[in-house]
């Protein structure tokens, strides 16, 4: 894939703000759960960049190959907790909003596993990854996960 546009070069201030808020939101919940959610949304959206990045990050957080490989079949795979299942169901419901408003059962599962504050945090994480998917797919972006990690360590100016 050839990049169509570099959004960081085209709108540096906004992309810096987007990146900062993305990091803040992503760090608001358990990193392992956050990576599973990001991978699942990226699978649905067909975002190779984010799949590459978040599978690397998931492994670094101790995620197993089995759970990463089975993520697209999470309903049938016995290796996910009820909490993870609720998060993945909510991820799918919000990522697929255009397919119809059939998210009531997903919300009921979410309420059973997450506090109201956690529900908001998870919803924000889902929104952020869907945003990154659209930026990467839309502009043909590809970023090395190591570059993302090193950029996150650079102190703000």
Image: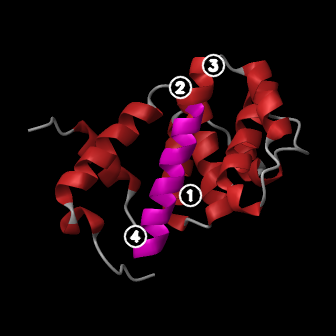
Residue 24 lies, in percent from the top left, at 37, 32
Left or right, 155 with respect to 72, comes to: left
Q: Is residue 105 above or below residue 141?
A: above
Residue hosting label 3: 116
Q: How busy is the neighbourhood of tag 1: few (under 14 within 10 Å), some, or many (20 plus)?
A: many
Q: CA distance from mark 2 to mark 1?
A: 19 Å
The magenta stretch spans which residues? 122-141
At mark 1, the secondary structure is helix
Marked residue nearer the N-terminal end (1 or 4): 1
Task: Using a 10 Å C-alpha cutoff, classify the residue at mark 3 as few (fewer than 14 neighbours), some (14 to 19) or many (20 or more).
Answer: few
Left or right placement of residue 19 versus residue 72 in this view: left
**In the displayed structure, does residue 143 sit left or right of residue 32?**
left
Residue 25, percent from left and from top: 43, 33
Label 3, label 4: how many angstroms apart (C-alpha)? 34 Å
Q: CA distance from mark 1 to mark 4?
A: 12 Å
Spot occupied by residue 65 in the image (x, y as percentages of width and height): 69, 46
| Residue at the disc numbered 4 | 141
Residue at (82% x, 49% y) in the render: 102
Q: Position of residue 137 (x, y in %)?
A: 49, 70
Q: Nearer the viewer, mark 3 or mark 4?
A: 3
Q: Using the rendered image of the protein, determine whether residue 12 is visible from the camera's viewpoint.
A: yes
Q: Secondary structure at mark 2?
A: loop
Q: Which tag, 3 or 4, sits closer to the chain's start?
A: 3
Q: Is residue 31 above or below residue 66?
A: above
Q: Main secondary structure of the magenta part?
A: helix
Image disc number at residue 29: 2
- Pointer 4 or 2: first along the chain: 2
Magenta includes 130?
Answer: yes
The residue shown at (63%, 19%) is 116
Which residue position holds label 1?
A: 51
């Amino acid at each position: 894939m050839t990049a169509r546009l570099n959004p960081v070069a085209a709108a540096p201030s906004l992309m810096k703000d987007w990146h900062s808020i993305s990091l803040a939101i992503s760090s608001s919940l358990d990193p392992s759960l956050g990576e599973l959610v990001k991978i699942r949304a990226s699978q649905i959206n067909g975002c190779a960049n984010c799949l590459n990045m978040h599978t690397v990050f998931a492994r670094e957080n101790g995620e197993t190959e089995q759970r990463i490989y089975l993520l697209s079949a999470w309903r049938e795979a016995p290796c996910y907790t009820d909490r993870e299942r609720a998060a993945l169901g909510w991820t799918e419901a919000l990522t697929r909003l255009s397919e119809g408003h059939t998210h009531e059962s997903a919300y009921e599962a979410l309420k059973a596993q997450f506090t109201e504050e956690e529900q908001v945090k998870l919803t924000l994480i889902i929104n952020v990854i869907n945003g990154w998917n659209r930026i990467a797919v839309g502009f043909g972006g590809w970023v090395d996960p190591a570059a993302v990690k090193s950029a996150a360590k650079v102190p703000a100016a």
